[in-house]
Each structure stands twice: as C-alpha cells, then as structure tokens.
Image: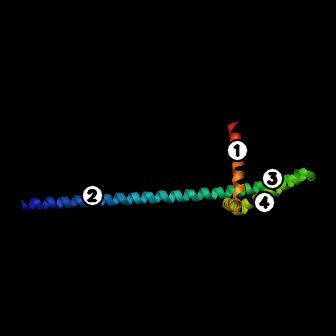
Amino acid sequence: MAIQQKDKGNFGGSMADSARDAANKTSDAAKDAASNVAHKASEAGSYISHKVEDATSSTGSGMRSVADSIRDRGPHEGMLGQASSAVADTLDTYGRELEERGLSGIADDLANTVRRHPVPSVLIGIGLGFMLARMVAK
C-alpha cells in the first residue's frame, strides 16, 4: 500500500509538471505571435509613412508646376496681374516647403503661427468652419 501512495504522488507531480510545461509553451507562443504582429504593424506603418512622404513631395512639385503655369498664362498687368503673381508666388513657396520639409514642417509652421497670433487664428478657424458648414448644408 505504501508503494501505491508513492506512485500516486509521483503521478500528480508529473501532471503538474506537464501542465506547467504546456502553460509555458502556450505563453511563449503567445509572446512570439504578439511580437510578430507588432513587427508587421511597424513595417506597415513605415511603408505608409514613406508613401505619404512621396505623395507629399509629388503634391509640392505639382503646386510649383501650377505656379509656373499661372505665371506663364495669367495676366501680367494691372490688378489681375498682381493677384495672379501673388497666387503663383504663394503656390511656389508652399510647394517648395512641401517638397523640402514635408507635412511635418508645414504642421510645425502652422502651430508656430497659431501660437504667435492666437486671436486671428481662432477667427480664421471660425470663418472656415462657418463656410464649411454652409457648403455641407447645401
């Protein structure tokens, strides 16, 4: 009878060890899967970021091209000439900024402008919101 008790105790310990091993393997597999998912998400984010920067650069180049077209084909004299020249200069400036610094550079400039001029910035925001609401309501 003493031998049977000893065997039962050993069997219980063996089952506990097997359960621990299975839990450790499951935990390791879950960690590996989570690490794999995180790595794939990081790769996807990097790819998307690269594509956005490429698109931003292309947009900047397009803006500069439109600016050149306005300069070539727009009026050159009088009030309309001054207006078309100002529009072309603005498009060229912001197109160059997009090409060189990307969206983050434009966002930094915008944030600095809002900090320097908070009241006009709020008024412009209200005006743009009003215009957008009118456009959407129609």
Looking at the picture, tell me which residue is in the foreground, 136 or 85. 136
Measure the C-alpha gap from mark 4 to mark 1.
Answer: 28 Å
Q: Within the image, what quadrant is residue 10 found in? A: bottom left
Amino acid under disc 4: Thr
Q: Earlier in the sequence, mark 1 or mark 2?
A: 2
Label 1 secondary element = helix
Amino acid under disc 1: Phe
| Tag of residue 66 | 3
Which residue position holds label 2?
Answer: 19
Q: Earlier in the sequence, mark 3 or mark 4?
A: 3
Looking at the picture, tell me which residue is in the foreground, 110 or 42. 110
Measure the C-alpha gap from mark 1 to mark 3.
Answer: 28 Å
Label 2 secondary element = helix
Q: Residue furthest right?
A: 77
Q: Are marks 2 and 4 in contact (CB under 8 Å)?
A: no
Measure the C-alpha gap from mark 1 to mark 2.
Answer: 65 Å
| Tag of residue 93 | 4
Amino acid under disc 2: Ala
List x then y, in percent, for residue 68.
83, 55
Measure the C-alpha gap from mark 3 to mark 4.
Answer: 12 Å
Q: Please tell me whether mark 4 or mark 1 is closer to you in this view.
A: 1
Q: Residues within 10 Å of mark 4 (few under 14, many from 20)?
A: some
Q: Within the image, what quadrant is residue 65 found in? A: bottom right
Measure the C-alpha gap from mark 2 to mark 4.
Answer: 67 Å
The residue drawn where x is 88% and y is 54% is: 82
The residue drawn where x is 70% and y is 44% is: 130
Q: Residues within 10 Å of mark 3 (few under 14, many from 20)?
A: some
Q: Residues within 10 Å of mark 1 (few under 14, many from 20)?
A: few
Which residue position holds label 1?
Answer: 130
List x then y, in percent, for residue 69.
84, 52
Amino acid under disc 3: Val
Q: Residue furthest left?
A: 1
